[in-house]
Image (tube, rainbow, N blue to C red):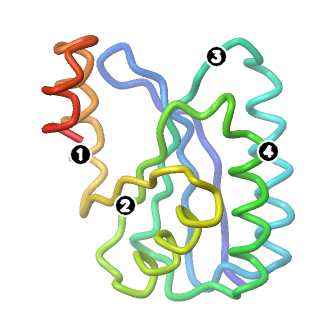
Amino acid sequence: MGMTNITWIQRENIEYLKISFVGIFTYKDAEWASQQWKEQFQAKPEQRIKVIFDALEMINYEPSARSVWQQTIAELSGQIDSIWLVTDSKLIVAGAKIMSIFTSFRINTVSSEDKVYEINAKLAKVGDNQTLREQLA
């Protein structure tokens, strides 16, 4: 069984919900983390939230855990602004691609958490310029 931690982070006036994974992400972990994620979103019902999945210390995941996560993304999609996956694991990236297909929600993959903050700070500066946004994301 792995370990999952959920925290709020504020960087350059942008708020993120960070979900960190350690070890093997099990069905039991997913059920617990899904409930915590929903509770965090319920506390901010009018806000669209940027979510970071920090999977740098995730070793693997159970397919049933991925299914719970897909369902949670689908349920919360109206409140999710963007999802950022931080990993250097090809296995974890493959799982994220599967989730993207089943949820129709793009999961942006980066190799470091700092990259998430850097890209979002640039996106905040370009505002509604869609061409620049697509180039940065």
Image x and y of residue 42, in percent = 82, 26
Query: Relative to 59, is 66 on the left or the right?
Result: right
Element marked by disc 4: helix
Mark 3 — residue? 47
Q: What type is the residue that disc 1 sits on?
A: Asp
Element marked by disc 3: loop
Alpha carbon separation for disc pair 3 and 4 = 15 Å
Image x and y of residue 8, in percent = 57, 33
For the residues bearing labels 3 and 2, Cβ distance under 8 angstroms: no
Res 102 label: none
Mark 3 / mark 1, whichever is N-terminal: 3
Q: Residues within 10 Å of mark 1 (few under 14, many from 20)?
A: few
Closer-to-camera residue (101/27): 101
Mark 2 — residue? 86
Mark 1 — residue? 114
Res 75 label: 4
Residue at horizontal 60%, vertical 41%? Answer: 7
Query: Relative to 130, is 35 on the left or the right?
Result: right
Image x and y of residue 50, in percent = 49, 34
Mark 3 / mark 2, whichever is N-terminal: 3
For the residues bearing labels 3 and 1, Cβ distance under 8 angstroms: no
